[in-house]
Image (tube, rainbow, N blue to C red):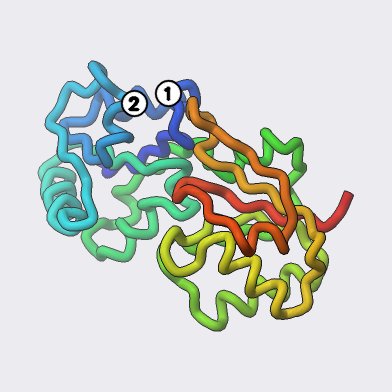
């Protein structure tokens, strides 16, 4: 049975692309992914390629569904891990695919890479993603609650609308300690990787790149 292979391609560096991801791409008759994701497999794609954009995502998924139905293998490249702020949710929500026809190839997420860089055991951390633009009052309330419970928080900010400075401002307004340690991990695993060690009050007055992970750590 043909599958839609949703392939995690890691946080950005080719060093973090798994052998399983490469195998899924090599056998696919169609590979769909953002330009920077496709670049990780230069010379390894044997089938057709579609450069994925915000404008063509629905048409690309429709074509993928048609090929899978026709018995063709398709690889959909998802940055990081498909199951965390990745394309698994998008594929399932489209209603175009039977879950039994979806195969997930997990990848290293920016969250994982950031935890490794900081030496954090993140099994008890509270994870949030705002990449999809969910900055509802309910989402904000859950973030504030996690802080008030003393949890380490690891999150993906929204570049527009809920950036690190907005998150810091929200927490400070709801009683967070200004000196709470914060780490901003930008472009993790890439050549221009940068890790800023700072505090909530300082982050509220700063701007960071769109590819970042924000870590709020309250315990030693």
Image: 199 above or below 27: below
Pinpoint residue 173: horizontal percent, then vertical percent: 70, 79
Q: Label 1, label 2: how many angstroms apart (C-alpha)?
A: 6 Å
151 or 217: nearer the eye? 217
Q: Which labelled disc corresponds to residue 40?
A: 2
Give SS at disc 2: helix
Give SS at disc 1: helix
105 or 129: nearer the eye? 129
Q: Residue drawn 22% across and 30% down?
A: 28
- From the viewer's perspective, is 218 left or right of 125? right
Residue named by callout 1: 14
Q: In which image quadrant can residue 34 be found?
A: top left
Q: Residue drawn 39% across and 29% down?
A: 21
Crowding at dot 2, Cα within 10 Å, few <14 / some 14-19 / many 20+, comes out as: some
Can residue 1 be seen? no
Pinpoint residue 90: horizontal percent, then vertical percent: 33, 59
Q: Residue drawn 28% across and 57% down?
A: 98
Can residue 87 be seen? yes
Question: Counting residues from the N terminus, which is met first, the one under dot 1 or under dot 2?
Answer: 1
Pinpoint residue 207: horizontal percent, then vertical percent: 53, 55
């Amino acid at each position: 049975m043909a599958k839609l292979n949703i392939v995690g391609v890691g946080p950005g560096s080719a060093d973090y692309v798994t052998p399983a991801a490469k195998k899924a791409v090599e056998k696919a008759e169609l590979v769909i992914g953002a330009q920077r994701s496709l670049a990780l497999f230069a010379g390894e794609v044997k089938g057709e390629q579609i450069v994925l954009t915000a404008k063509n995502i629905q048409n690309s998924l429709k074509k993928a569904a048609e090929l899978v139905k026709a018995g063709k293998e398709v690889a959909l490249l998802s940055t990081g891990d498909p199951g965390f702020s990745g394309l698994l949710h998008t594929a399932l929500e489209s209603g175009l695919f039977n879950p039994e026809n979806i195969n997930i190839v997990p990848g290293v997420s920016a969250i994982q890479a950031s935890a490794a860089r900081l030496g954090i055991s993140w099994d008890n951390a509270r994870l949030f993603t705002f990449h999809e633009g969910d900055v509802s009052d309910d989402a904000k309330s859950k973030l504030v609650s996690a802080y008030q419970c003393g949890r380490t928080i690891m999150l993906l900010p929204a570049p527009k609308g809920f950036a690190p400075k907005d998150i810091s401002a929200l927490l400070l307004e709801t009683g967070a300690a200004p000196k709470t340690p914060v780490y901003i991990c930008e472009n993790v695993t890439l050549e221009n990787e940068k890790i800023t060690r700072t505090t909530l009050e300082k982050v509220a007055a700063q701007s960071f790149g769109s590819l970042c992970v924000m870590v709020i750590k309250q315990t030693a």
